[in-house]
Amino acid sequence: MIEQNDELACVYAALILADDNIAITADKINAVLKAANYEVEPYWPGLFANALEGVDVKELITSLGSVAAAPAASAAPVAAAEEPKKEEKKKEEVKEESEDEDMGFGLFD
């Protein structure tokens, strides 16, 4: 549980730095955490700094909602296109069964 709190503290520190348009580095994450009087394992700030290197955090956050909506919108036409195919298959199966019945004899005749 403590590790999750350390991770969360580093996330918040990175968000604070991104909000202030400050480059996210291990030293700056440590400075924010020190100002908050919160101690984390020494590898967390460097891990977050390396993970967020070259990433525009503000852009990532603002585009997150539009990225989640895009697959849902594009999946609807695909699903609609698949429905007629399913209906056609059902009709073909029904036709096949009816052809077997029209032969004039049954299995137990």
Image (cartoon, grey):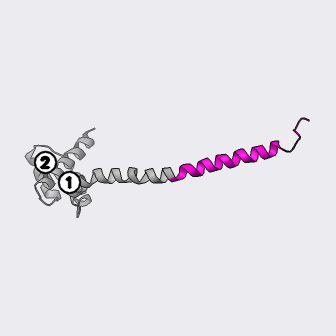
Residue at 25 percent across and 56 percent down: it is 60
Mark 1 secondary-structure assignment: helix
Would residue 50 appear left or right of 87 to someone viewing this image? left
Q: Is residue 104 magenta?
A: yes
Mark 2 secondary-structure assignment: helix
- The x and y percentages for residue 101 are 81, 42
Residue at 51 percent across and 53 percent down: it is 81
Q: Is residue 54 magenta?
A: no
Would residue 93 appear left or right of 45 to someone viewing this image? right
Above or below, 24 against 69 in this view is below
Residue at 21 percent across and 56 percent down: it is 57
- The x and y percentages for residue 98 are 77, 43
Q: Which residues are magenta?
A: 81-109
Above or below, 100 against 67 in this view is above
Q: Nearer the viewer, residue 56 or 34?
A: 56
Question: Would you say the residues marked 2 and 1 are in contact, meaning their CB atoms lie under 8 Å apart?
Answer: yes
Q: Nearer the viewer, residue 25 or 75?
A: 75
Q: Nearer the viewer, residue 9 or 59?
A: 59
The residue at the far top in this view is 108
**Disc 2/disc 1 C-alpha distance (Å):** 9 Å
- Badge 1 amino acid: Pro
- Badge 2 amino acid: Leu
> Callout 2 environment at 10 Å: few (<14), some (14 to 19), or many (20+)?
many
Disc on res. 16? none
Indicate which disc, 2 or 1, sits on the residue closer to the N terminus. 2
Disc on res. 45? 1
> Callout 1 environment at 10 Å: few (<14), some (14 to 19), or many (20+)?
many
The quarter of the displayed image where residue 28 is located: bottom left
- The x and y percentages for residue 48 are 23, 55
Q: Nearer the viewer, residue 51 or 98?
A: 98
- Identify residue for label 2: 33
